[in-house]
Image: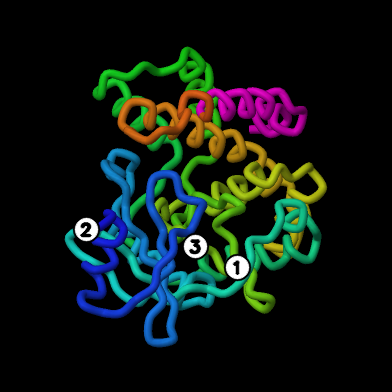
Amino acid sequence: MSDLARAVERVWPGREVRFEVLGGGITNSNVKVSLDGEAYVLRVVGKDTDLLGIDRSVEFAATKAAAAVGVGPEVATFVEPEGWLVTRFIEGTIPAVERMREPDMLVRVAEALRAFHDGRPIPGRFDSFRVVEAYRDTTLDRGGSVPDEFDWAHGIAERIERLRGEVELRPCHNDLLNANFIDDGERLRIVDWEYAGMGDVFFDLANFSINHELDEEPRHALLEAYFGEGRAQDKRALELMRFMSDFREAMWGVVQTAVSELDFDFAAYAAEHFARLERTAFEPSFQQALEAG
């Protein structure tokens, strides 16, 4: 019996079920399970994901909070002590990245994010400035090496942190990859809440922007859809946090080189994101935002 078959048996012992592996995950395995005319997704967590700053109890709470405001999938159960999450399967499609850049879709994204950001507090804290430092420390503690680019990027991050100052902590997703959006034709749902925590809404907005490679015009359209107006300070905050989004992603790749046993080129992943954050750092819009403070 495979590990995933044993996991399904662990959750539904003695039941007649059908299951298939869903794609998309790197550190976790997602399985669609069908029984009694219903369909669920079982999320089996990978090894040592706590070293990535993931707390499965926070993921559980965040997913429930997202479901409560119509943004996330309905939670069926939480399996302890493993930290596995079972949610209702959402019938729908992952929109193409190009589709996500269109004006009407940017409005839907803004509405979904704002609904969660305005929802009830969740446990856990997500601070991108501390996350990159924690990933550095974990990498070194595990005998890995940190790229030379870290010091340069960290210096810029310190400037950004001073410019952001004290921010209101709100529930945030913090991992808005395109694969985490599902459109059922009526509602746009967001899945994979493992990095969720109380944080800066501009990290979410920037994370979506950088992951979908939004140019300045669609970035401003996203802000207008979210805030109802296009304010200069919001544009500056978004530009700054785009850098932090890629810095976090680059350091996620770095720490994975030291802790992961998966057959995946995490070093190349980290290098790709370091290269992209360097391009961001030299964009006029970013330079202007950095100097405006």
Q: Which mark is residue 191?
A: 3
Q: Earlier in the sequence, mark 1 or mark 3?
A: 1
Amino acid carrying label 2: it is Glu
Q: Which mark is residue 82?
A: 2
Looking at this view, is 162 or 45 the one in front? 45
Looking at this view, is 207 or 259 the one in front? 259
Q: Is residue 273 magenta?
A: yes
> In what element is the residue under mark 3?
loop
Q: Is residue 93 above or below residue 196?
A: below
Q: CA distance from mark 3 to mark 2?
A: 19 Å
Q: How many marks?
A: 3
Label 3 with label 2: CB-CB less than 8 Å: no
The crowd level at tag 2 (other Cα within 10 Å; few <14, some 14-19, many 20+) is: few
> In what element is the residue under mark 2?
loop
The crowd level at tag 3 (other Cα within 10 Å; few <14, some 14-19, many 20+) is: many
Q: Where is mark 1, residue-wise?
A: 112
Q: Residue 134, percent across and down?
A: 33, 32
Magenta stretch, residue numbers? 270-293
